[in-house]
Image (spheres, helix red, strand yellow):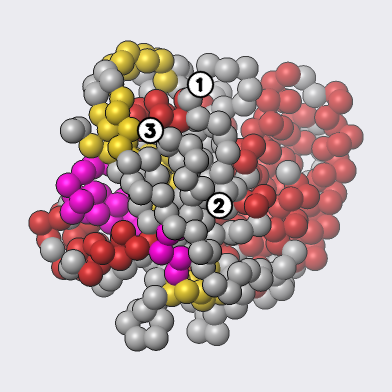
Amino acid sequence: VRSFTNSLAAPLSPEDMQVQSSPDASPTKWHLAHTTWFFEEFVLARFDPSHRWRDARWRFLFNSYYDAVGPRHARAARGQLSRPSLADVMAWRARVDEQMISAMPALDEAMAAIVLLGTHHEQQHQELLLTDVQQAFAANPIEPCYATGPDEPSAAEAAPLRWLDYEESLTRFGDEADGFAFDNERPAHRVLVGPFRLASRPVTNSEFASFVADGGYERAELWLADGWAAAKASEWRGPLYWGNAGEDAATVFTLHGRRVRDPSAPVSHVSFYEADAYARWFGARLPTEYEWELAAMGSSLDGNFVESGRLAPAPGAGHAPCEQLFGDVWEWTASPYAAYPKFRTLDGALGEYNGKFMNGQMVLRGGSCFSPRDHLRATYRNFFPPGARWQVAGIRLASDE
Ligand SMILES: [Fe+2]
């Protein structure tokens, strides 16, 4: 996991890694440092009381949001940290890796669980590193490429949209397996889910273009009030990285640079508000997270993940009855991010990992083309504010009829 993070940073220059493109996004250098801080703060320094920090001042710089650990540098000002240098951060990564390798054989079960949490935490930051680089490069008028990719869209056509019928069921949801899961996926509990229909694949670029062409962004009746206000205030006219009118109209900015949009690929970089408005325009709705999980329970964990190297959503193969539940795009659900019944946070500072964010956000499921495959599960609950657009988030429809 640690070396994969380094490989994701490898195509970037030190200057690329310094940029913070918005208050929500972080510089690559900060991601590299913060994921290292996690292991020094929560494992090395706690395991060995005589542990000496590489530089104790960095605890302030690279703590993200843990109030129990102490005060921290302002999130929106992470791009201003020209020191420590990238070379110092990379040397710190190597030093902490060596110390971890030495310490791990003697760790007790509780500490080992924190190491495992640290690796899954780092995988979350691997995805954020890529979403944040895409946003930073999109803000640069010369639109740099992170990686080389195909010049033309794939010739594949999206499979026709089909509706899969699910009967009413009383089902156990959430994680109760032996492997790793975040606290927010627990405890497992039973939920009665009424009959519903789920779309066989995500909404494509060409389908979303029909919504835009039909005045979707100009029709208040399709939008939640907060979404309409956000769309007007920020002058949304299409998904975040779609080209504007003129010769860029049919393009999208990707980690491969600006490319002709693949009409058959899932639409991405839309907010919950846009997903919800699209569903209303279509005469459908978004699935609840339980409906989504019910479909995913029986699906194999196949898909277009970061390991494919495509780094962009791709058309489905049209083979499975329900496609692309995993990978390609995170799928916004209609479910607010809230605690499962009898939810308990972890003890200590790590209790701040998920629980304190359980208000004002929506759940997304399934992972994206930026997610590591072994980071994902059917029970995995991602969450973002409803107006967030810089994540690789798309749309799967559900309906009651
Ligand atoms: Fe973090």
Q: Amino acid at mark 3?
A: Trp
State the quadrant of the N terminus.
Answer: top right
Q: Residues within 10 Å of mark 3 (few under 14, many from 20)?
A: many
* Residue holding disc 1: 175
C-alpha gap between disc 1 and disc 2: 23 Å
State the extent of the magenta-drawn residues as a range: 261-286
* Residue holding disc 3: 292
Confirm whether the magenta stretch covers residue 18: no
Please give the label number shown on residue 10.
none
Q: Is residue 375 above or below residue 259?
A: above
Do callouts 2 and 3 mark residues in contact (Cβ within 8 Å)?
A: no
Q: Is mark 1 within 8 Å of ligand 1?
A: no
C-alpha gap between disc 1 and disc 3: 15 Å
Q: Amino acid at mark 1?
A: Asp
- Work out whether mark 1 precedes mark 3 in sequence or the reverse, and give the earlier one: 1
Does residue 29 appear in the picture of this structure?
yes
Residue plotted at (47% across, 74% down): 260
Q: Residue 145 appears at what percent x and percent y?
A: 61, 74
